[in-house]
Amino acid sequence: MTPADAAELLAHCAAFDRRTIGEADARAWARALHDVPLDDDLLDSVAEHYAHTDKWITVAQVREMRARIRVGRIDAAHPVYDGNPDETGEQFVARRQAQLTAAAEGSLPARTITQAISAARPRDVRALVAGVGRTVEPAEPRPYIDPTTRAELRASLPNQRAALVELTVACPNELCRAAVSRWCKSSRGAELRTTVHGRRRDAYATEHTTCPECGAPPRQNCTTTEPHPARIRAAVLEVAA
Ligand SMILES: [Zn+2]
Ligand SMILES: [Zn+2]
């Protein structure tokens, strides 16, 4: 803020407290508020102060009140920076700061707490970093039972959730890591209620089925890195039985 800005701010204060303003006051306030712009938030701070007290407002109070107004807006917006695993630390800091400034200005739409929490997913970001250089499964796993068969299967079972027997094992997919009896989640965080990730399907087959091809008993891996398709089919047939 320039001394001219400070003079304007002090004139605004004088409207409430009838103070007289000299050039020295304007220079002193400008120096103390050198990093604060003369904006609506600043003028609102003065109005807010005099709504509660007759005491003359100080530089420190102007600064504090303006900060409080802006933090209140940030809190209301719950800004969440989703992050980008490819960005540098500097880019992260700059983008996060830009977002907080936008929130303080009131130009970010407010988000609910739930949105803010479900958008955070720091675990996903860690998983992405850990998965660099590895093959990653498609975010939306293809159903290994066609939807019609799945629907018939489900209708014949007393408990809907029992149709996804794979929920009895945790999902090993790095981007998901759904715990036992939790739905798998897509890369956007949506619950997948009709299917699971391929690796969870494999984990379930390994856990519960003897492989018809290589003879590996339950809880023992096939001789190949992935379970034999016959073992996965056997696991599915067991559910249908
Ligand atoms: Zn999963
Ligand atoms: Zn096998």
Image: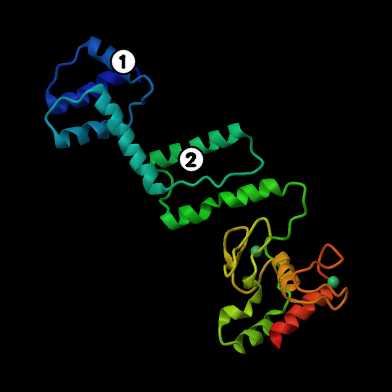
Name the residue type under label 1: Pro
The verdict on label 1 being within 8 Å of ligand 1 is: no
Crowding at dot 1, Cα within 10 Å, few <14 / some 14-19 / many 20+, comes out as some
Q: Mark 1 highlights which residue?
A: 3
Is residue 237 placed above or below 214 in the rendered structure?
Answer: below
Q: Quadrant of the C terminus?
A: bottom right
Note whether residue 28 is visible.
yes
**Which secondary structure lies at badge 1?**
helix
**Which secondary structure lies at badge 2?**
helix
> At x 59% / y 72%, what residue is drawn?
193
72 vs 177, nearest the viewer: 177
Q: Mark 2 highlights which residue?
A: 99
Note whether residue 40 is visible.
no
Query: Which colouring convention does the figure follow?
Result: rainbow
- What x and y, as percent, mark residue 55? 13, 27
Is residue 182 placed above or below 41 in the rendered structure?
Answer: below
> At x 67% / y 56%, what residue is drawn?
174
Name the residue type under label 2: Gln
- What x and y, as percent, mark residue 34? 36, 19
173 vs 15, nearest the viewer: 173
Q: Is tag 2's residue or tag 1's residue first in the polypeptide sequence?
A: 1
Q: Quadrant of the N terminus?
A: top left
- What x and y, as percent, mark residue 219? 75, 69
> At x 62% / y 89%, what residue is drawn?
156
From this viewpoint, which residue is outermost toward the top? 24
